[in-house]
Image: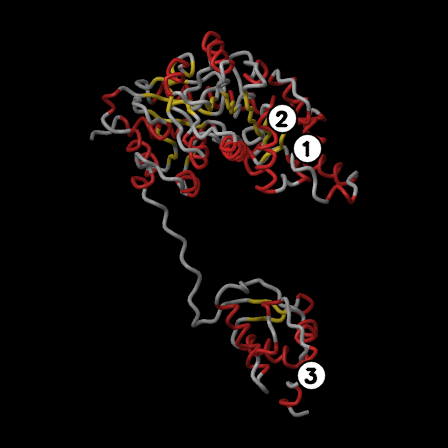
């Protein structure tokens, strides 16, 4: 058969292919094979068909394009002869290499220099960059022991959920979250945080970060564009609020927690707090200060309560959530990021009735709700008691690591003062003013030695002593001891 005739089918039936959006109508007359080989070569070169990609079977692609099968097999053969494709029998035709003349993928960006990373005015990407920077020992705060994730319990719960899942459960659900998880969260909060809430009051969100984003949008709708924040306080939380609001004035924190007199002086109508275990100082909001804050709220203030790691306590009884005392004036945010894993992106938000519609609307237009399957699995873990058992295991493990960090600090950094040891996943250290360097310089020097941590000054806008925030939950006791030894050597290194 003459090849040109074989390459000239009835184009009126051509529909094009989903694969690389190929359309045989684009080929010049009599040049189908050349055209297809060129398009495939381009796709391999620019990365649309990376190594390992399995190409459509020749008869399938020929049918989609409305061309003879010989056009496709000839094009595949040309790239195979050039070393870009290989036939794998029943495994089909697979991309094995880019053409020699093509430029390779861009080289990954070199890690940012430690001195550039630990600037006094960190930008919005700083946490992403810090996470991506390799280190021999990671003592950054806020990371739980991810190696203890209850894989077996999660798989059991997932299988049970899938066995009982109806087809309609896989459709679009309630934007507020699945009813079964909202009920489980309400029960969890009642027994662990003293909060009485109807499941209809619970909104399932993608972690505390989204809770703050939703609140930022909703508050703007009711005329609140300013939320005061603790100082020192979480840089990340402050950044999330500041993205949506006009101002986040700092309010100093002392040994009893946030200073309510200073909060009043700002004139801010709302405040973001971590009252159960203040970040990063670790102080618990004292009884007198708590009553003073609640009076401020009754007079018209709004409290945003971030209960980010209140369940991780070791040396003190639990402190009831502020939401339990004044639900009409407190927005409450919690998550499983520090209990199971941040990657699950699951948390909950409770707000006063007057804000509920605005917050639910913000969630609806953000993502239509969290993925359903993880919600159902988490609900089963909560209801079965598996999550409570996991929390007890974590407390024992984290306490041993906290004790190891305190012992290492005493041995290698006796001049440092330890704050916030009674609960949480981190310790805050402060140093005498005569440290000889800034805490950002100390953190940069530590990273250069393979030890990752965070400077206290990142989390403060008001004057504060030099310090570090050190996480202990994710590291072994040996790594913790070695990391503190490195820090001790740096502090005593001659300048």
Q: Which of the two discs, 2 and 1, labels the residue nearer the N terminus?
A: 1
**At which x and y percent is residue 315?**
51, 13
Give the vertical position of 239 relative to 171 (above or below): above
The residue that appears at 40% across and 28% down in the rendered structure is: 248
Q: Are marks 1 and 3 in contact (CB under 8 Å)?
A: no
Give the vertical position of 381 relative to 127 (above or below): above
> Which residue does the numbered mark 3 point to in the structure image?
10
Q: Quadrant of the N terminus?
A: bottom right
Numbered disc total: 3
* Along the viewing direction, whichever of 28 and 448 lies nearer the viewer: 28
Q: Secondary structure at mark 2?
A: helix
**At which x and y percent is residue 59?**
70, 74
Q: Quadrant of residue 93?
A: bottom right
Rounded to the nearest angstrom, the CA distance separating label 2 from label 1 is: 9 Å
Estimate how packed mark 2 is, as few (under 14), some (14 to 19) or many (20 or more) residues with alpha carbons within 10 Å.
some
Q: Residue furthest bottom?
A: 2
The residue that appears at 23% across and 21% down in the rendered structure is: 434
Q: Quadrant of the C terminus?
A: top left
Numbered label attached to residue 390: 2
> Which residue does the numbered mark 1 point to in the structure image?
153
Q: Which of the two discs, 2 and 3, labels the residue nearer the N terminus?
A: 3
Residue 93 seen from this side:
yes
The residue that appears at 46% across and 34% down in the rendered structure is: 240
Q: Secondary structure at mark 3?
A: loop
* Along the viewing direction, whichever of 252 and 328 lies nearer the viewer: 328
Nearer the observer, disc 1 or disc 3?
A: 3
**At which x and y percent is residue 152?**
67, 35
């Amino acid at each position: 058969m003459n090849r040109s005739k074989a390459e000239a089918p009835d184009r009126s039936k051509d529909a094009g292919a989903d694969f690389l959006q190929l359309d045989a109508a684009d080929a010049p007359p009599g040049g189908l094979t050349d055209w297809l080989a060129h398009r495939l070569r381009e796709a391999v070169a620019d990365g649309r068909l990376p190594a390992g990609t399995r190409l459509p079977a020749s008869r399938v692609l020929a049918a989609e394009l409305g061309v003879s099968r010989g056009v496709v097999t000839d094009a595949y053969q040309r790239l195979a002869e050039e070393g870009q494709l290989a036939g794998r029998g029943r495994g089909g035709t697979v991309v094995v290499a880019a053409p020699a003349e093509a430029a390779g993928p861009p080289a990954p960006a070199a890690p940012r220099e430690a001195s550039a990373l630990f600037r006094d005015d960190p930008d919005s990407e700083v946490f992403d960059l810090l996470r991506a920077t390799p280190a021999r020992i990671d003592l950054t705060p806020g990371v739980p022991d991810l190696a203890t994730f209850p894989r077996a319990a999660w798989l059991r719960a997932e299988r049970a959920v899938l066995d009982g899942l109806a087809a309609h459960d896989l459709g679009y659900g309630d934007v507020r979250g699945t009813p079964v998880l909202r009920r489980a969260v309400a029960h969890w909060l009642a027994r662990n945080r003293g909060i009485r809430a109807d499941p209809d009051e619970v909104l399932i969100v993608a972690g505390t970060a989204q809770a703050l984003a939703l609140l930022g949008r909703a508050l703007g709708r009711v005329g609140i564009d300013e939320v005061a924040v603790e100082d020192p306080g979480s840089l990340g939380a402050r950044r999330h609020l500041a993205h949506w609001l006009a101002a986040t004035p700092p309010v100093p924190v002392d040994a009893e927690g946030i200073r309510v007199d200073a909060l009043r002086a700002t004139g801010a109508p709302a405040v973001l707090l971590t009252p159960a275990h203040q970040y990063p100082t670790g102080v618990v909001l004292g009884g007198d200060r708590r009553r003073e804050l609640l009076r401020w709220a009754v007079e018209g203030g709004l409290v945003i309560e971030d209960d980010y790691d209140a369940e991780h306590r070791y040396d003190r009884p639990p402190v009831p959530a502020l939401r339990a005392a004044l639900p009409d004036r407190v927005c409450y945010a919690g998550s499983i990021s520090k209990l199971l894993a941040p990657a699950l992106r699951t948390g909950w938000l409770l707000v006063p009735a007057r804000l509920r519609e605005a917050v639910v609307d913000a969630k609806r237009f953000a993502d239509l709700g969290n993925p359903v399957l993880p919600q159902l699995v988490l609900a089963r873990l909560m209801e079965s008691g598996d999550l409570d058992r996991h929390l007890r295991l974590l407390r024992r493990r984290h306490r041993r690591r906290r004790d190891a960090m305190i012992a290492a600090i005493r041995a290698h950094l006796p001049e440092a003062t330890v704050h916030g040891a009674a609960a949480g996943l981190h310790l805050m250290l402060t140093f005498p003013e005569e440290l000889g360097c800034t805490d950002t310089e100390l953190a940069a020097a530590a990273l250069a030695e393979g030890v990752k941590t965070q400077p206290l000054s990142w989390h403060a806008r008001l004057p504060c002593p030099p310090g570090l925030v050190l996480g202990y939950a994710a590291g072994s006791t040996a790594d913790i001891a070695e990391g503190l030894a490195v820090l001790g050597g740096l502090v005593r290194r001659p300048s």
